Image (spheres, coloured by chain):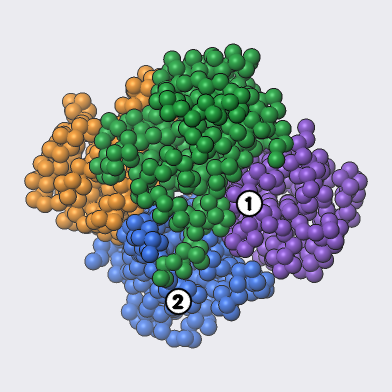
Chain colours: A orange, B blue, C purple, D green
């Protein structure tokens, strides 16, 4: 069901890899709600090729950008504004990458060169995107920026590894830049802390299936799906949430404020 | 602008006193978004009389209820379900009262009998409403309940007095009951922590004007208005936020995550 | 091992029921560290009789007081100051009671009369104690007050029932009164959020053993014992923590910031 | 006054620059409490030379180490263990450096190369130290590690700039590594979030004096001094706090849970 919540709005969606991606689901929902879109992803992700399918579905150009390359970001925003014929109203940052996780390195044995890349790509990229927009004055008044994060930024989930630290950094960047962009131009910046979701990216994490099932049992409403996250992103991009900024918003079926459930206690007693 | 976000939904709005009330603004917005409403307030508040104006505007019956009287609550829900011809989809709890504040008693000198009333009316009333709905199975699957609160539940604002404790209790009740109602029926329960707002109720608090101006200076986006809060409530009542539960959601222009602003530092240097 | 951390200090310990009580362990440790003590508990608890054993061990008078009776509290403080020959340096509030829990009432079915008693005894009692001290100017400069609490104040543990709400209220009272007493007299007020502990009081809670074992598995250091909590209380009463106030301090082996452990995941996979 | 709280314990203190440094004050207090120490700092800081004075006072060797150089860290721990004749019981991490702050770059205009250095030196250095100890099994059972941080990790203080993000990352590393070291060896890792303190490092921050005075007015007990922080560190290194881990502990006179004070409101009304 669509409500025209984003009628007339223009947005950039980072990070749609394939149809399981939250960014993919969000692009579809934003389109349904009347938004015009530009899709972006890293060149290597684009070569894996499915994004063309999404681009057709939402009638959006795909503009590759390495989020740690300031020239790429500038070009992306320039071309987006040209495409839109004006400023940008919202941005979804759904970007995360950990070479240490991919290589199966334990948190106590991470490679610091990889770690630096993880932080740059997963966290400081939000600063880079916002700063590029800031310099180009690319975001419209009351623009809305959402970055996806995970509760490992607050509590330890051992297999989440260095991504926990990357998400903590990401959330801090959202607050810090959110302050400045709010004061200057009423732009709001928030993070959405989503349930573990069976995306292609998520599936790479060790012990992920066991963990998904634990989270399901620990959430009064169960785990939130990618489609539900897309719905929530739509509300955050809409004009109905203008005064929400610098927040980390849990979208997780109640997991974050549940200490234990009867379902988990029952399992513990087995 | 309206989006039909609440088309077909039925809701009860507690606490609309006059046109400055957040509950009043929310009722108007819910009506615009297609919801059918029932309005409720304490008998004494109803006698002050303006609610009739709102009832006409949103085409809703007014059913008085003392929120600490279980018979009143049961009658309210029964009549509401009869009026709606079915279950209830959302409830706004915008209820707070402190005799100690009204009487100007300092926090260190509160009357404990008054305090007990404050906690019962301002906090346990949420339990009473939810428990009545629970017993009557009055809330539909995926129903949404929002209670308004204030950041004094987390940090001390001296003039807010015992209402700080009442709000902390209220937020805990929202989590506790939210767990049970979520597990049983996917009903979600959240609190919205709103900027200080110039309502008739708020104006009674000592030093309120000075405080509003401080909050304004401490919020990157400024204080959120009652109308903006109404917009936010609409998103929480809609189907787009189904997996958000047991949360305390700050709707405050960034106040909650701002340590200090340049505006405040400048003022401090005077 | 003793360090004379509390040499010359005078304190009141509320809530020592039997030798498993955290208050009991704390009294022993405070005595070892050189403090002079007064023990207090509700008249009904005193009649159960073991406190005499503790009183002998720590050479302290026992002064009964119903913590919701202002006359009792005033008398307690008067007699304590007389006994000490001066003001009071620290107070331990280890008080909690829920008739709804005792009667086995589910959270959704609590008796509101019982609930009011639970809140008054478990939470507002801290206000009553502090207010009595405030009026009598009974606490010395830099005095330290600690109340014991539990993480159910932040996250739902279903079997903890209405005590979750009571603890949330208690923590808010600690902050609120801590502000005023800090400004006026440098007195600090904190809560310690302790692991589930096998005390006689704790054992009454339904599903408590299963829960203790879950908490043990979810804490990197395991559950904290009553003796360890006593040690921690000693540091909070000492002069080494003078600038810590209005805090909720988790003493729980890391439970509070652990999202999941390998031990729990392993159990979930069974 | 000394209590022999650290009798027989061995610790490494990072970051004592001059006698205003919190690390310096902590070294003095740890020495008074009976600990044996090793002092470490970056080679460039050592050349500025005052540390010799401290080394004499606490009878400790100074071993230079660049905290982002794994060979340096290994050598430091090896030499320390040789000096101590055994394992290490505690570590103070008081390390932070931001070239962007030094160069006066606004948060929206930071140099990303500098930023990477800031994160590596101020935050990942804690991982590097802990990982070196982990690999060498250098920390004794129940060892205690404290890193100093600031509340800008939670809320925005605009002039704190990128150090806010660095501190958020640091606190996450403390939790993440604290989990693993706790499970393996009962080692606990915490951060202490200290009031703004007039150290030589702190003084470099723009608007620091105005900010110190604001924090003083916003703290019911006033700002905590470096000496008081040293006292608090002593308790965290002692055996009395063994079950506290993965926590961020505010040592700030109540600033963190104060929304506003009468002193600030009065100033705002001028």
- Report the front residue among C62 and B139: C62
Q: With A88 as the anchor, is B117 left or right in this view?
A: right
Task: Please tell me in which quadrant of the rendered image residue D102 appears.
Answer: top left
Chain assignment, label 1: C
- Report the front residue among B177 and D209: D209
Chain assignment, label 2: B
**Rounded to the nearest whole Å, what is the CA distance between mark 1 and mark 2?**
32 Å
Checking the image for residue A223, the label placed there is: none
The location of residue C169, given as percent across then percent down, is 61, 58
Q: Secondary structure at mark 2?
A: helix
Query: What residue sits 32% from the left and 31% below the top?
Result: D116
Checking the image for residue C190, the label placed there is: 1
Q: Is residue C214 visible?
A: no
Q: With A71 as the anchor, is D80 left or right in this view?
A: right
Characterize the local packing of mark 1: few (<14), some (14-19) or many (20 or more) Cα atoms within 10 angstroms.
Answer: many
In the image, residue C124 above or below residue C219:
below
The location of residue B127, given as percent across then percent down, is 57, 62
Query: What residue sits 67% from the left and 71% below the top?
Result: B112
Checking the image for residue B203, the label placed there is: 2
The location of residue C111, given as percent across then percent down, is 68, 63
In what quadrant of the picture does the C terminus of chain B appear? Answer: bottom left
- Report the front residue among D23 and B46: D23
Query: What residue sits 63% from the left and 32% below the top?
Result: D30
């Amino acid at each position: 069901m669509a409500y025209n919540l984003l009628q007339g709005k223009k947005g950039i969606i980072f990070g749609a890899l394939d149809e399981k991606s939250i960014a993919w689901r969000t692009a579809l929902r934003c389109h349904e709600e009347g938004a015009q879109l530009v899709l972006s992803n890293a060149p290597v992700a684009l070569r894996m090729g499915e994004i063309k399918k999404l681009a057709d579905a939402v009638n959006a150009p795909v503009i590759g950008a390495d989020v740690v390359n300031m020239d790429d970001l500038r070009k992306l925003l320039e071309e987006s504004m040209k495409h839109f014929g004006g400023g940008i109203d919202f941005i979804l940052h759904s970007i995360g990458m950990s070479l240490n996780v991919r290589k199966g390195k334990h948190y106590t044995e991470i490679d610091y060169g990889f770690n630096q890349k993880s932080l740059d790509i997963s966290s400081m990229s939000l600063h880079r995107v916002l700063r590029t927009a800031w310099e180009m004055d690319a975001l419209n008044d009351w623009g809305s920026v959402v970055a996806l994060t995970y509760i490992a930024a607050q509590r330890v989930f051992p297999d989440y590894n260095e991504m926990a630290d990357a998400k903590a950094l990401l959330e801090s960047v959202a607050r810090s830049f959110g302050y400045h962009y709010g004061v200057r131009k009423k732009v709001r910046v928030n993070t959405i802390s989503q349930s573990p979701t069976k995306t292609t990216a998520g599936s790479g994490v060790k012990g992920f299936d066991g963990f998904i099932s634990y989270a399901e049992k620990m959430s009064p409403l169960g785990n939130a799906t990618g489609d539900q996250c897309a719905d929530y992103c739509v509300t955050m991009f809409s004009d109905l949430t203008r005064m929400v900024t610098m927040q980390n918003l849990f979208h997780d079926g109640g997991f974050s404020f549940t200490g234990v459930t009867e379902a988990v206690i029952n399992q513990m007693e087995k």
